Amino acid sequence: MKVSDAMTSEVQLCTPDDTLKDAAQAMAALGVGLLPVTDNDRLVGMISDRDIAIRGIGMGRGPEGRVGDVMTADVKYCYDDQDLDQVSAIMGDIQVRRLPVLNRKKRLVGIIALGDIALVQCGNGTGAALSRISRPGGQHAQL
């Protein structure tokens, strides 16, 4: 099965010039915690609710702060024609629950989340990916 068979293709986007308030309101309205950031039809980053809280509010930026100032610019992604099992393994390796999906022309075409994979594969690799994503350690480990 390919990523394109499981991904969500309708994706809300924001730009680096959008405000943190706009991004937060879009996330709240959609019930999501992550938005792709695009500039001239190119993926340039991702902004999460955590980015807004930690790099935005936590660093003294108000609701009018810019998405481009707090987004994660080092974006991990996958391709729509990749094998879903391979992407599940990659998600586990890099400890993420969702990835933007690009076509081979590097245009954003969707997002794949662990929940999307679970819906189409019913435990076929999802549990293994989740156990690797959630493994202890890393930068934010509790002592």
Image (cartoon, rainbow, N blue to C red):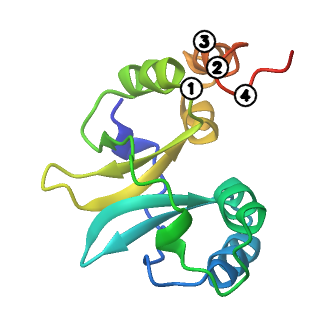
Tell me the kind of residue under disc 2: Gly
Task: State how many labels appear.
Answer: 4
Q: Name the element at disc 4.
A: loop
Viewer can see residue 12: no
Q: Earlier in the sequence, mark 3 or mark 2?
A: 3
Q: Earlier in the sequence, mark 2 or mark 1?
A: 1
Cα–Cα span, label 4 and label 1: 12 Å
On screen, residue 27 versus residue 43, left or right, reads: right
Asked whether the beta carbons under mark 3 and mark 2 sit within 8 Å of each other, the answer is: no
Residue 110 x/y as whole percent: 40, 57
Residue receiving disc 3: 128
Name which residue lies at 34% across and 62% down: 44
Q: Earlier in the sequence, mark 4 or mark 1?
A: 1
Asked whether the beta carbons under mark 2 and mark 4 sit within 8 Å of each other, the answer is: yes
Cα–Cα span, label 1 and label 3: 12 Å
Tell me the kind of residue under disc 1: Gln
Residue receiving disc 4: 140
Q: Earlier in the sequence, mark 4 or mark 3?
A: 3
Q: Residue furthest right?
A: 143
The mark lying in front, picked from 4 and 3, is 4
Residue receiving disc 2: 138
